[in-house]
Image (cartoon, rainbow, N blue to C red):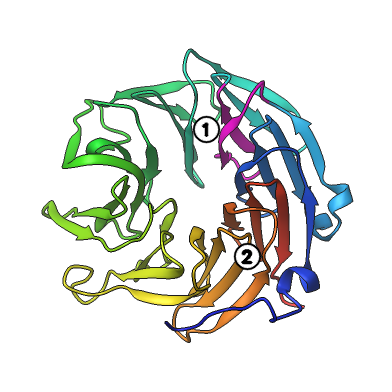
């Protein structure tokens, strides 16, 4: 163990530089706009709460709006610089603009459970999963580019860093597609079992899925070589690569588990641990976009930040409010947002002062 935190370490970063607000229902996700100007939280009651800069520290100024008739299952930053996309069990995909206006993009026949977006200076792509299908649309959300069929219900979707490929996890493995291909030919990545989440290496070197069996499975994309990462006491509900791809950081234990993706790893190498809370399961992780820092949320509502190199631990938020169910850094690295199963939402200002 590289570090632990106990309840006597106060005051927390949240108390010094953040704010919280209580919502009705579980917080099912949070996201931060691409321009880092707004933080959004969504709930199982169909509400979205938006905190805008510079009012992150004033939770009474955060706006709450009901945008779905039922639980919101997914949220992502829009492909534009501002705004968000939400999907719900009312079969709708909606755009929530920076000014709070809501637009219907899809009213389908199935729950919209996963959304991801990619963009650069030339444009962007929106992807969302419904049942076995992943639909790609242009950045406006109005034009369908293609619909990709999978062998079973899609459990996660991810673009590679350049937006050239999209991958989806599902039962018995994952599928990878080229976004701009004129003829859609799938690259199947097969491994028996239930795959419940997905991540792709920033350099496109590997694809990793989390599994129902409390382990990870990976494929080296250059040759399809299989990689297995096991030993977790519980399911890995959250994982992400660090900004440079050196580590794959995951939940699923009472420490922050980090698998090495350098020097021939992760095969044949044990994972590193970046601190934790003894006996309390890590439920969510997020990787800082600029520095070698990870954030971790735990089953008791605690949030920590850890330096992956120096092995230093900083308490962000102490226990309370149920298990952490959502966690995100802003693209500029100046804010950390978290939400819990009991409806507590928090934003911490990380900007230099």
The magenta segment is 68-89
Query: Percent x, y for residue 279?
Result: 49, 69
Position of the N terminus, as image quadrant, is: bottom left
The answer to whether one can see residue 79 in this image is yes
Q: Position of residue 253 (x, y in %)?
A: 42, 64
Q: Is residue 127 above or below residue 212?
A: above
Residue at the image position 69 percent from the left and 50 percent from the top: 39
Q: Nearer the viewer, residue 73 or 223?
A: 73
Name the residue at 67% across, 23% down. 103
- In the rendering, which numbered label is found on residue 139? 1
Q: Is residue 105 above or below residue 233?
A: above
Whether the magenta-drawn stretch holds residue 346 is answered as no
Q: CA distance from mark 1 to mark 2?
A: 36 Å
Q: Secondary structure at mark 2?
A: loop
Label annotation for residue 302: 2
Density class for disc 1 (Cα within 10 Å; few <14, some 14-19, many ≥20) is some
Q: Is residue 333 above or below residue 213?
A: below
Q: Which quadrant is home to the C terminus?
A: bottom right
């Amino acid at each position: 163990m590289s570090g632990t935190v106990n309840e006597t370490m106060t005051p927390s970063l949240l108390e010094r530089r953040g704010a919280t607000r209580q919502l009705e229902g579980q917080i099912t996700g949070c996201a931060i706009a691409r321009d880092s100007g707004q933080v959004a939280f969504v709930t199982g009651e169909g509400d979205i709460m938006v905190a805008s800069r510079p009012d992150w520290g004033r939770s009474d100024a955060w706006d709450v709006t009901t945008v779905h008739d039922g639980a919101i299952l997914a949220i992502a930053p829009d492909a534009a610089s501002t705004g968000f996309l939400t999907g719900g069990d009312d079969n709708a995909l909606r755009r929530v603009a920076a000014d709070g206006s809501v637009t219907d993009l899809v009213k389908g026949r199935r729950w919209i459970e996963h959304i991801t977006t990619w963009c650069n200076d030339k444009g962007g792509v929106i992807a969302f999963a419904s049942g076995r299908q992943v639909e790609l649309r242009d950045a406006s959300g109005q034009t369908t580019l293609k619909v990709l069929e999978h062998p079973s219900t899609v459990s996660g979707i991810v673009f590679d860093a350049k937006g050239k490929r999209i991958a989806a996890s599902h039962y018995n493995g994952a599928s990878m597609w080229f976004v701009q291909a004129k003829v859609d030919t799938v690259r199947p990545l097969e491994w028996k079992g239930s795959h419940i989440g997905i991540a792709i290496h920033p350099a496109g070197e590997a694809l990793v899925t989390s599994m129902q069996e409390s382990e990870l499975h990976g494929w080296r994309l250059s040759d399809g070589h299989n990689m297995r990462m096991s030993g977790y006491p519980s399911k890995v509900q959250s994982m992400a690569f660090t900004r440079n791809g050196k580590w794959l950081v995951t939940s699923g234990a009472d420490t922050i588990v980090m698998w090495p993706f350098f020097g021939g790893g992760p095969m044949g190498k044990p994972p590193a641990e970046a601190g934790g809370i003894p006996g309390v399961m890590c439920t969510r992780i997020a990787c800082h976009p600029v520095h070698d820092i990870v954030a971790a949320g735990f089953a008791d509502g605690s949030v920590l930040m850890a330096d992956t190199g120096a092995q230093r631990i900083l308490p962000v938020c102490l226990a309370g409010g149920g298990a952490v169910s959502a966690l995100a850094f802003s693209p500029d690295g100046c804010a950390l947002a978290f939400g819990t199963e009991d409806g507590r939402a928090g934003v911490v200002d990380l900007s230099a002062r």
